[in-house]
Image (tube, grey):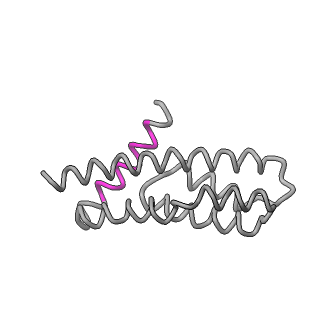
Amino acid sequence: MNSKISEKKNILKRLLVLKEETSLEVTTEILRMFSVRQSDYEFQMKNYINNNDFDKIKFLAHNLKSTSANIGAVRLPQICQWVEDSNPDNRLLPFYLRSMFSEYKKTKYFANEIMDQLSGAAVQ
């Protein structure tokens, strides 16, 4: 199965469970918080990388790991954990950072797409 489809299904599955346990409004708010809270992530990450501020990179990875896991993402929290477990001398760190950035964009896209669908369902 395509990893994009699989990840989107993971997120959707988690959000459907969350919707059943809480409400459509709570589920939509959690998605909105993910999108809003992480809205300046790209700028922050680029800034921290350019300044070689590894402590802030790890802190951002930790926060992103938590918020993405809350919405059901699997790949992004795993990659964030790799960044957290790394040290600045790790030869794989540039790969981890690129992967984290790329996976973040996909996860945010999926979250926004699902949020739009849920918002449409709330109106109907």
Looking at this rendering, what residue extends furthest in the right direction?
Answer: 89
Q: Is residue 27 magenta?
A: no
Q: Is residue 49 left or right of residue 115?
A: right
Dividing the picture into quadrants, the one containing residue 36 is bottom left
Number of marks: 0
What span is in magenta?
5-17
Residue at 27% x, 47% y is 117
Residue at 19% x, 51% y is 121
Dividing the picture into quadrants, the one containing residue 122 is bottom left
Identify the main secondary structure in magenta.
helix
Against 117, residue 15 (above or below) is: below
Q: Is 60 in front, or is 91?
A: 60
Q: Is residue 11 magenta?
A: yes
The percent position of residue 44, horizontal first and vertical second, equals: 65, 62
Q: Is residue 74 left or right of residue 120?
A: right
The percent position of residue 124, horizontal first and vertical second, equals: 12, 51
